[in-house]
């Protein structure tokens, strides 16, 4: 059986270093906001090319605290409209609702699955005060176009970078491309912890300060609370593990791209639609997503042939019970995508013979 994703195998490579990090963390006696968190924040800011990195508890909080931070700074106000892609993991939408803002769904470019300036331009009304772009499946959205558009209209550009650690364009690395970016270190992400974790990256010192306050009970001085904060901190031990893994991130992403290139050049089956990839480092293949008709038949076929898979995602956000106030929206591009997509195994620890096997099974479908 070729697993969709073997997280144990991914982390096994670091076992000795993790054990050392754990021992060090335990000896330190400072288990919350210790030296490991500040060290990782510095390393990750440097890696992304931003002035600031603030560790938080998870990716959803990273997004929510950015939005609440902008409200606190007066750049957004409760009830403002925020443009979001109609095809994303639900966290993107939830963050907008948790911050007391209104999501406005925009259909993606069906080729890249991402927002681009053309689609966004049509949906920009005067109520829109921010855009959240998602670099979905690991591929950077049309950053240049959207950045120019948002600057011209004085709109905030926020990136949900939870699937794009290390993706790079000529403008820089994911995390440095928008006014602020949110990362998740959920175990399955390209940079994943052994539990939950997240971070905000930005060059905006005011925003960085507010996000840090929000994440720590509204306090930067013990028992002095300045705003109605949250408890959302990156765990110190997870930070230590992330520092270890960050050193291998570029190499791991290069391996993912290498596998993707093989899939794209060697899977030759008219029943399978392959993803768009321009061959550059702007894609880190968090997921390798193909499209098929009759997906359930295809899933049965993969299972029978010992190839694991996953659906990113089976139900679009506006069709979730939790978001039933949006269920009447006409979002046919997102609905089509959610009906057709299948994610194939891809990971830095996949062996060449496993890649061979996946290709063979897909060509024989
Ligand atoms: C994983 C993910 C999140 C949320 O991250 P958590 O750490 O699970 O809260 C947000 N957006 C996208 C696109 C994601 O893939």
Image (cartoon, rainbow, N blue to C red):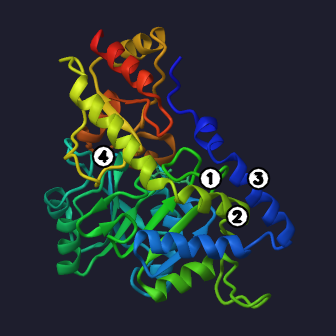
Q: Is residue 40 left or right of residue 324?
A: right
- Please provide percent x and percent y for residue 88: 39, 48
The Cα atoms of the two marked residues, 2 and 3, are separated by 16 Å
Which residue is at a point 60% across and 70% down the rendered structure image? 40
N-terminal of the pair, mark 2 or mark 3, is 3
Q: Secondary structure at mark 1?
A: loop
N-terminal of the pair, mark 1 or mark 3, is 3
Of tags 1 and 4, which is closer to the observer?
1
Disc 2 residue lies near ligand 1 with CB under 8 A: no
Of tags 3 and 4, which is closer to the observer?
3
Of tags 1 and 3, which is closer to the observer?
3
The residue wearing badge 2 is 235
The residue wearing badge 3 is 19
Checking the image for residue 329, the label placed there is 4
The Cα atoms of the two marked residues, 2 and 4, are separated by 39 Å
Near mark 2 (Cα within 10 A), the count class, few <14, some 14-19 or many ≥20, is many
Foreground residue among 196 and 107? 196
């Amino acid at each position: 059986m070729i697993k969709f994703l073997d997280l144990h195998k991914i982390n096994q490579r670091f076992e000795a270093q993790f054990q050392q990090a754990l021992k060090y963390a335990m000896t330190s006696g400072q288990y919350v906001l210790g030296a490991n968190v500040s060290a990782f924040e510095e390393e990750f800011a440097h890696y992304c090319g931003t002035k600031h990195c603030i560790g938080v508890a998870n990716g959803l909080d990273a997004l929510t605290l950015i939005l609440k931070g902008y409200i606190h700074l007066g750049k957004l106000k409760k009830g403002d409209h925020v443009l979001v892609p109609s095809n994303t993991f639900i966290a993107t939408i939830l963050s907008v609702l948790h911050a007391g803002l209104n999501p406005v769904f925009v259909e993606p470019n069906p080729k890249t699955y991402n927002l681009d300036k053309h689609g966004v331009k049509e949906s920009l009304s005067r109520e829109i005060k921010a855009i959240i772009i998602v670099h979905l499946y690991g591929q950077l959205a049309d950053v240049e176009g959207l950045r120019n558009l948002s600057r011209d209209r004085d709109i905030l550009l926020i990136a949900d970078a939870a699937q794009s650690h290390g993706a790079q364009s000529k403008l820089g690395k994911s995390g440095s491309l928008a006014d602020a970016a949110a990362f998740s270190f959920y175990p399955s992400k390209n940079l994943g912890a052994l539990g939950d974790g997240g971070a905000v990256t930005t060059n905006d010192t005011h925003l960085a300060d507010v996000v840090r306050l929000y994440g720590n009970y509204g306090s930067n001085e013990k028992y002095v609370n300045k705003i109605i904060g949250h408890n959302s901190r990156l765990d110190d031990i997870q930070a230590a593990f992330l520092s270890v893994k960050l050193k291998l991130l570029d190499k791991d992403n290069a391996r993912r791209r290498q596998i993707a290139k093989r899939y794209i050049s060697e899977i030759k089956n008219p029943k399978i639609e392959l993803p768009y990839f321009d061959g550059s480092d702007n894609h880190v293949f968090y997921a390798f997503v193909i499209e098929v008709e009759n997906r359930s038949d295809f899933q049965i076929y993969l299972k029978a042939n010992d190839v694991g898979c996953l659906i990113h995602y089976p139900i679009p956000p506006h069709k979730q019970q939790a978001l039933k106030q949006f269920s009447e929206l006409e979002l046919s591009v997102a609905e089509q995508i959610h009906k057709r997509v299948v994610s194939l195994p891809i990971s830095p620890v996949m062996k060449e013979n496993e890649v061979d096997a996946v290709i063979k099974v897909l060509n024989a479908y």
